[in-house]
Image (cartoon, coloured by chain):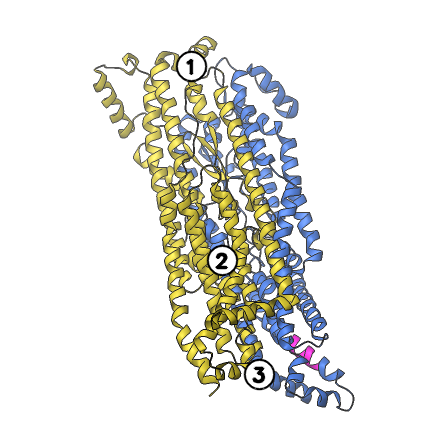
Chain colours: A yellow, B blue
Amino acid sequence: MSAITLIARDELRLMCRNRVALLSIGLLLLLIFVSAVTAWSHHESISALRARFQTQANEAFEHQPDRHPHRVVHYGHFVFRPPGALAAFDHGVDSFTGSAMFLEGHRQNSANFGDVRQSSLLIRFGQLTPSFVLQTLAPLLLIFLGYGVLTRERETGTLRLLLAQGVSAGALLAGKGLALASIGLMTLLPALITFAFIAGEPGSAWAPISMMATGYALYVLLWVLIVLLVSARARRRRDALLTLLTLWTVTVILLPRIAPDIAASARPLTTRLESDIAIQKDLRQMGDSHNPDDPFFAAFKQRVLERYGVERIEDLPVNYKGLLAVEGEQLTSSLFDRYSRESFEAQAAQSHIMDRFGLASPAIALRRLSMAAAGTDLSGHQRFLDQAEAYRYAIVQRLNQMQADAVSYADDTATGDAADRRRRVSAENWQSIPDFEFQPAEPHALASAAIPGLMTLAVWLAAALALLAPASSHLRRGIQ
Amino acid sequence: MNLLLHELRLTLRSRLSAFALVLLAVLAIASVTAGMAEVARQRATIARIQPLQQQDVGAIAQWVTKSKDPGNAAYYTFHATWDSPSNLAFAALGMRDVAPFLLRVRTLGLQAQLYEGETFNPELALPGRFDFAFVLVYLAPLFVIALFHDLMSGEREAGRLRMLEALPGGSRTLWRRRVALKFMLLYAALAIPFVCAALLSHAQATVVLGILLIIAAYLALWVAITLAVVRLQWSSVTNAATLAACWLVLTLVLPTLAHVVINGAIPVNQGVELTLAQRENVHGAWELPRGETMATFYARYPQWRDSPPLPGDFHWKWYFAFHQNGDDSVSEQVAAYRQGLQARDAWTARVGWLLPGVGVQWLMAWLAETDLRAQLTYQDRIHDFHRRLREFYYTYLFDDRPFGEADFAAAPKWQ
């Protein structure tokens, strides 16, 4: 048996004799288990709930009676964002964004009923998921178990003995590191089992899962090295502990809170109210549909008449009001797209600023990696918003076209009950409109979105590894 | 007094203590500054929208005035509402970063408008805000631990404990003096920045006093926990590790567990359900005889009963009546939804008795009016405003009065 494994075994044996150490390992494993179970059941229940709501909304839409297509444009549709398979491991922003969205003509609504507004302030303390336990608590376990691994040897004078007996400082570092790494592996094990479970679920893929597993492994390994480095340098155990706790507090608790404030003030967002007003203003400038002499709509009317070679809109083979609705929706939607793109860009810029803090805090880098691979980050939510908007536009325009083709202009402008019956379109038409199917990101896209976070973690790891050599010579020098 | 000065010099000579105190003061200053900046930003936003809103209404007035149709005015005019931050909001931003503080409503069914969200980046909201409540709840206990964990063990490890205990009059007064001094220093590092910010923000004196008491009580609790561990006569390092573990369990682990338990025990799905139901009831009116809709409406709002009968074709009063019927049809679900939210909040307050961090956070957000209750109060005010708006437009719609340019200015104003 080599010196390294001997040292590691000895260190682990010492930990096994320490009841507090055993207890804290046991508690953390229990916590990971509890978090995996609760996160999984939460995931299952919200998946089922959202699927139920979606079915209910689809049925309501399809069971509409014969109606005027424009009534259906206003009746609208509801869509719900189904959570991805890996959301069971990392909820990400799922609870912070709405998951229900009302789609209607002329308007773009927000996604509503997010957990964050329905959960009292407890949700701001963090959510019990395996990702939270590993990101936040696993480093603390390593700190509590490991702050003394080398400082203890120095404080009690055994370091001098060990080195005098011919154990190299490098072997000592490697052995102690091995012992800590095996504790780290133990905390990772339940996570890996959870990953294996998730991989068996429909809709999950190995690429993002292995990305996440690599990320968490690198993170735990990084903390093993940080603990080892501080323990090798500190003169007293208390100094080692306080230094490590400070490092943990700053990188895991403090920086993740400061970074958003800086990002938010660097790129302020436009409020919904302001963009609503701006959109209305732009619309009025493009063309005022309420003004019969408006040049934009007069030109549109002229184009339509020319296309069909007729003099009056009453002579058109299609319903002019339907064509007008198609044109109007195209105008408003182009503005919705423009303003939401601007907002997305500003939010992406904010998140990018947050990402840069990953170089100051590995926890931020890991969070980015984890959410990106799970598809529960900002871009995952925006993907839903984009698809919902595309779906909204498609059904609204289909209904507007239906008004143009299936409802006559005469009926559409007439009054009275008979005309009201004639301008209704058969209910079969609602059933022929396809349901909303959220398309999750491709596995390789999720995996590649996790690369920046992984790179940041790799930089951290490289820096920690580079510090090992000076730490080892510090150990040697310390006893001379 | 002289002895206290000596103790002060001793405390500040310890690099750890001096560094910790300065750092805590810096963090407290940074947090109140960030909080005040956020409050100022929200106030500026509220001020900025006023001219925009006026222009928007003006543009609608321009074309509505031609037809003088009150239905067009009621349908197309959005009315701005806002929820100004309280003077203490800087200390605990609470839910103000995720719940809207601006909302435009019109006279259509309110239940389809009330739950609209604000644009925010969820990735920034996820870790929580850096405000004074955060510094107090999360960080202050760690500073208590840093300053107190070696109170006795430090002296023992330095070989001075026996000598100190042998002092005439015993070491009791010495420990008391030391604890009092360190407590005062920590309290000053937190309270002075807070009071300065509160003065600058013109916060109410009683509420400021309340927060000062909360700071004292929370610090005292952590000092007590620390002293309880210190009395066990372990080594400094064991004390520090034990106390950090206590902090971890009380402020990180148990609150997340409580969150899971409370949300599991009190599900609130009524929000989505009532929105779906309201939509069915509103749009279903197109299939019903219009007289039936009006009868339902008049039964609830008899003051409009004398309005002339509906004409043969479309009339806006019928349209607004069925929107209101739709809202009224889900009032029970609205109440249930609200009760669910309040129950979650009430249980959080109860958990606060056991978990001091949760209790302090809850109290601070309550005093700063940034909690769930403040959000519900804002919704109540919108509800009331919406009623006033409806009544205003109803007088034109149900009495068939023309709606001119001057009438736009007569519409109810928020607040």
Q: Using the image, tell me which numbered label, if any, was put on residue A425.
A: 1
Q: Main secondary structure of the magenta part?
A: helix
Query: Pointer 3: what residue?
Result: B14
Q: In which quadrant of the rendered image does the C terminus of chain B lie?
A: top right
Type of amino acid under label 2: Glu
Residue B243 appears in which quarter of the rendering?
bottom right
| Residue A296 picture location, percent across and down | 27, 30
| Residue B186 picture location, percent across and down | 62, 73
Q: Using the image, tell me which numbered label, if any, was put on residue B109.
A: none
| Residue B165 picture location, percent across and down | 74, 87
Q: Nearer the viewer, mark 3 or mark 2?
A: 3
Q: Is residue A284 visible?
A: no
The residue at 54%/52% (across/down) is A190
Residue B355 appears in which quarter of the rendering?
bottom right
- The segment highlighted magenta reads B177-183
Chain letter for mark 2: B
Q: Is residue B62 visible?
A: yes
- Are discs 2 and 1 located on one and the same chain? no
